[in-house]
Amino acid sequence: MNFASEINSVIRRLVTSGGVHQVVLERTFDTDVTDLWNACTNPQRLSRWFEPISGDLALGGRYALTGSGTEGDILRCEAPRQLAITWEYEGDVSYVDVDLIETAGERTVLRLTHHVPPGEHWETYGPGATGVGWEEGLRALSLYLSGGARAVPDGMEEDMSSSESQKLIRLVAHAWGQVDEEAGTPAGDAEARALKTAEFYVAMT
């Protein structure tokens, strides 16, 4: 695995406004906007790299991820460019925006913004908990679109539990710790939150 390439493949930002934290990720994919939209919204394709999903994926509908138990409402669905949903998990409600932006050469940028409310979880883990989780998903999407052997669900599960993937998790958590510090969190606190995030995700692999 090329760790530098993986770390540099994602643009990370943190913006706080009105007490709500916006965790922003951008990654470019080697496919056109229509195909990327389909990979993110077609239930059959979505289950190949993310989670099995049920429900009505149209505007005003409600979805449920059958693996994690996350569910929510479809607030915006403007194919093939914009999707906005609620993200409801174990009583907590947040919001996710997905924007697809065409670039030259049939490549597409996926920008994901997760609007996270303040609370104990944020104070403990900072932006890394949200950021690391979504980066794992975007890496799985990249593998899926590349057609590699690791892109199938069993292959991804094996890949995520490897020592290389655990090292990547720690590097990604550290990168989010740097974003946390740049956003104004004291360096020691940002580092501590990043370490807790890394240990949380490594323990899950």
Image (spheres, rainbow, N blue to C red):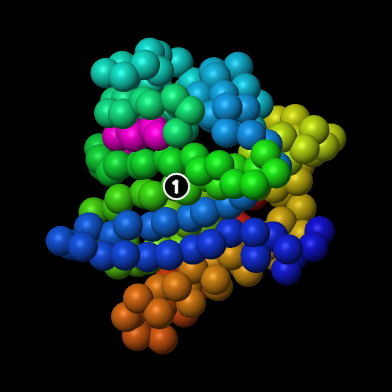
Q: Is residue 5 left or right of residue 85?
A: right
Residue 191 in the image, given as x and y percentages of width and height: 46, 79
Q: Is residue 28 left or right of residue 1?
A: left
Location of mark 1 (residue): 112
**From what the image shows, is residue 124 above or below residue 85?**
below
**From what the image shows, is residue 47 above or below residue 13?**
above
Q: Which residue lies furthest to the front in this view?
A: 104
Residue 18 occupies which quadrant of the picture? bottom left
Q: Going 36% across and 25% down the picture, which residue do you hit?
A: 77
Residue 148 in the image, given as x and y percentages of width and height: 82, 37
Q: Residue furthest left?
A: 18
Q: Which of 201 and 139 is in front in this view?
A: 139
Residue 48 occupies which quadrant of the picture? top right
Q: Going 31% across and 19% down the picture, which residue do you hit?
A: 59
Task: Please state the extent of the stretch shown in magenta in the rendering.
Answer: 82-88
Badge 1 marks a residue whose secondary structure is strand
